[in-house]
Image (cartoon, helix red, strand yellow):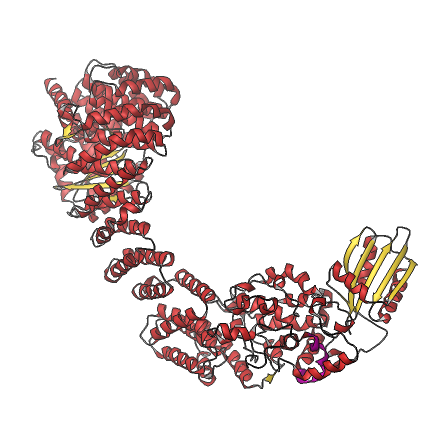
Amino acid sequence: MSSGSHLSKELHDLIKSIGETRSKQEEDKIIIKEVQQLKTKLNEKNMPPKKVKEMLIRAIYIEMLGHDASFVHINAIHLTQSKNLALKRLGYLCCSLFLDNDSELLILLVATLQKDLASTNVHIVVNALTAVGKLISKTFVNALTEPVLKLLTHNTDIVRKKALMVMQIIRQLNQDCIAEQDYDDRIRRGIQDKEPSVMGAAFNLYHEELKKGAVNKYKPLTGTFVSMLKQIIEHKLHKDYDYHRFPAPWLQIKLLQILTLLGANDLKVSEQIYEVLGSTLRRADDTTINIGYAVTYQCVKCVSGIYPQQSLLEQAANSVSRFLKSDNNNLKYLGINALTQIVSISQKYVLEHQMTIVDCLESNDDTLKKETLELLFKMTNEQNCEVIIQKLIHFLKTSSDSNFKKDLFVKISLLNEKHAPTQEWFIKTANTLFEFGSEFIDNDVRNNFFKLLIDNFNDIGSEFGVFITEIYSELLRNDLQDNILKIVCWVIGEIGSQIYDQDPNKLNELTQLVILKLDSQLESETTISWILTCLAKLQSARAFQMFDQTRAIFQKYMQSKNLDCQQRAIDFYTLAKFNAALKGSQFITVDPKMSFLDAYVQQERLRGAQAYNPSLQVKAAALGSATEAPSLNFGPYSDNKYGGSKTNTFGTEENKSTTQNPSAPTIAGPWDDTGYNQKQPPPPKPTIATPMAIGSTTGMGSNGSGQTTTKTTMQSMGSGQMGLSSNQAQSTYVPPVRPLPPKEDPNLKEKQKLANQLFAPISQTQQQPQSTQKKGITAVAAPKQMNTNPNIPQITQPKQTAQVQNLLEIDEPLPIKQQQQPILGAPQVYVQQPQIITQKPVVVPQQQQQLWSQPPVQTQPIPQQQIKSYIPANINVDQYEQLWERNQNIKEVTLQSKIKSEQDFRRMIQTININIIEVIDQEIICAGANAENKSCVLLYGCYNLNGSLELKINSTDPKDAEYILALIKRQFC
Amino acid sequence: MIKVFLIVSSSGKIRIRRFYDEVEFARQQQIEQKLIVLTSKLSPNSCNFFKDLDGIYDKKCKIVMRFFGTLYFIAVIDEDESELGVLDLIQNIVDLMDKIFDNACELDVLYHPDKMNALIDEIIVAGIVVETNIMDIQEALKQQETQIKNK
């Protein structure tokens, strides 16, 4: 140790006083004083060199402490011109430390550097080269290139290797200074240098070039590098280069890096490397010194970097696994890193070391833990996930490092989602995870989890539902953290209420459990909101009985100071009121067989009416709906249950699978059975009960499943769809051909009334005639459902009871403010899909016309015989022709009219309000139906440019033809 | 490539500072401060390697730290450099210091910044390790010293 005796007292004192300072301010004071002193002293003339040297050292010291010492820069430059090597060296050092590449002072250095590079004194040259390496910038590249290149052939190896490095820097700064060919030649001469140190420097240059992407250019050199590596590992280099008797480890590392880049994704090159790589790895493995491990590690990197080879990978994994067992954390860390690289190629070789890897998580070293977790995450698959997740959860339980726990939490949940072997296992793991990592549950985690649950529930059905409801209701009996309670509430509300829809005992039990939670210590008010929502969902279940309790609770929280809580309480309270009213109301039992119609049917048939033949049924429903269905299917998952299937219930038995909402066939349960009619689950809504009851008949009555109690749809909570959709259904029902054009909307209210009237008198037999023909056709799958899938929850089971009509009106004034209700998880949206309307059969011959000429005929007598209105019929050309043949009341006329173009014709058709089926040149066919009695009107028209209009009107009722003709004459002639 | 090479005292004072890429002085100091903070994570048994996850220098970089006596040797290296190699390089440098200063200590680094920097310059040029042969370096440095003394 040096005593520092060669130093002046000042420097010694400076260092000492700085060392004794306790604060930055104190230090600053000393430095400012010191700077003042230095400034004055440096300006003194004839300072002895030793003094100057010391002052610069003091300046270095000041600058190192982070203070500005720019006043000495000029002195440093002066010093480089000194003849004294020590001063020159210090001068260059100061310049390299103090000056930036863009400093203006550098220009003062160039001449000195040029001179020194050409010096005969090796040490001056070396110092100058070092300075050039640090300070050279674009501005001076040209001035210095020449002298540096000359030094490449200097007879001292220290100079040659530094010159090589500086050459590389020069080329980086300005490619034009050295031609590519020239540069290549020079580095090739570098690796051929007789001095290994120069050769080693040249390797760096190759490595840099390869990193920049010049891989193909140097591939031919692979053999050279391989043989060099071979020579090194065989101790062909001078012993001086051994490090702890290990031959030139840094050169080996460098060569391995080069070979990795050369062999990447190239089998041919890699094949040249395999052998030497194998023996390098073996030899490095034999040592027990650090640098040997460094080479091993580099070999592993190389093995995983080049084109993969089985035996090498195996060898590498084995070598590395020994790192993991070492006590040295550095080695463990590198081992984990190396395995991470191997895993990305093949999991096979790493899996056997899995338990060793897991143990690394126990380390108290953060870096190591992080890396290990990363590796485990990458190597987990279906086979080992149970073991690994268990271990990880163990660490989650025991760890106290919250960053690490957060990491663990995220990784475990990802692994669980990805690799969980069974649903049960998944749920249980998730619950444990939530229990021990509840502080990490945020909205994303929750929503993601809910999504998974509901997807699974939709896929698997009730079994899964029962399972998770059981698990979560069990959880509810314990003390829970708020975050978990929220999840439990959601599951009970969303899935539990569906599963136990008709099981009052279970519902009561669940409700009680949930209510109890309100009294427990809760961390935040938002949790109350979750509980309230859960109760609201539960009370929407059909068998729910505890309205008094829930109402009391909602009433209590209507006073809550938490706005969200309050709003929910108010909304749910209102809903509870209606729900209760609903349950209390009388259900009208429908005889799905409609046996009461039998007499009427018989009577009609005796009179000569045709027997019902389904094949003749107009397939109008298929039209139109197909295009609309998907667009309406926006409910997150309700579409499976209600959306697609519901639409079909409204139509007639003609709704084949093609008309179905695309999502409908995915329903879990019997609806995707064979047979077109079995695709029609009965309606869950009262509003459509009437037509449905007509439409679906046989095979349903006896087993008692044909009873539908309407489920007031709490599922519509948060979406408010119900009221809206039922309105649509009513308003458009009357003219069932297709959705009303918007212009008719003003009539909406009137039509609603009408609809209400329509639905009410279902038990009256006025509409008897319609159903006769349907017998035996609409054998809805209901009975089969019962048999094949007893597990299916009750809600999905069709029941056919018409609900008391005024429900529809109840919905309207509900004070649900959708925007204020955060949609929790994925709310069930109960969407009444408007496409139902378009699916109705449209124009049917006389015998069937009564199908949709429902009560209105009786309840609302047509006020005036003279004014008729029509509605478009949505049929295709075939159906048109079919109908045309059947009706014989054809009225043929040729008129002189204003109609001279298709546009005119279309306007005329619009006026009548029927629709165009097809246009062929100047011939147009149209179809419509009388809005009142639904009798069909077919029109064939051919216009001419001269205004002559040929019309053929074929109508079931001849009055229609006359009326239309008169209309056309009046307005268009 | 080595991006930064620092020698820091255990009291948190910079003793040797070498940046091999162009970095502004202000940013240099920020990097130093963060690295000094990081030294607190180093314990005798822990791993000497850190990934620069917080982007102290560059997120792709790795940090190698080693503690000798009262000095932390810190190297920030890029992804290609071998961590273990650099760790042994630090060992190499310490060995060399021992030889040159005869049982080196912090004060030697303080009093002889010129010699220390010359030593490092022999080993690392422009961030690349050019020489690892202790004998060679020692020989070169010795020659310089004798020349200095003779003049």
From the top left corner, tell me how far across and down residue A507 is, in percent: 43, 80
Please name the residue shown 48% across and 72% down the image: A789
**Residue B19 versus residue A968: which sits nearer the camera?**
A968
Please, what is the dominant secondary structure of the magenta stretch?
A: helix
Residue at (77% x, 80% y) in the render: A606
Instruction: Give x and y (percent) for residue A522.
Output: 35, 74
Q: Is residue A84 left or right of residue A459?
A: left
Q: How many marks?
A: 0
- Residue A270 falls within the magenta-colored stretch: no
Specify the quadrant of the image occupied by residue A599. bottom right
The answer to whether residue B29 shows anywhere in this view is no
Looking at the image, which is closer to me, A772 or A13? A772
Residue A687 visible: yes
* Magenta span: A761-773
- Rendering coords of residue A31 (x, y %): 20, 38
Q: What residue is rendered at 16% in x and 33% in y?
A: B93
Is A39 drawn above or below residue A188 in the view shown? below
Residue A919 vs residue A831, the one in the foreground: A919
**Where, quadrant-wise, is the N terminus of chain A in this rendering?**
top left
- The image shows residue A733 at horizontal and vertical percentages of 69, 72
- Whether A762 is among the magenta residues is yes
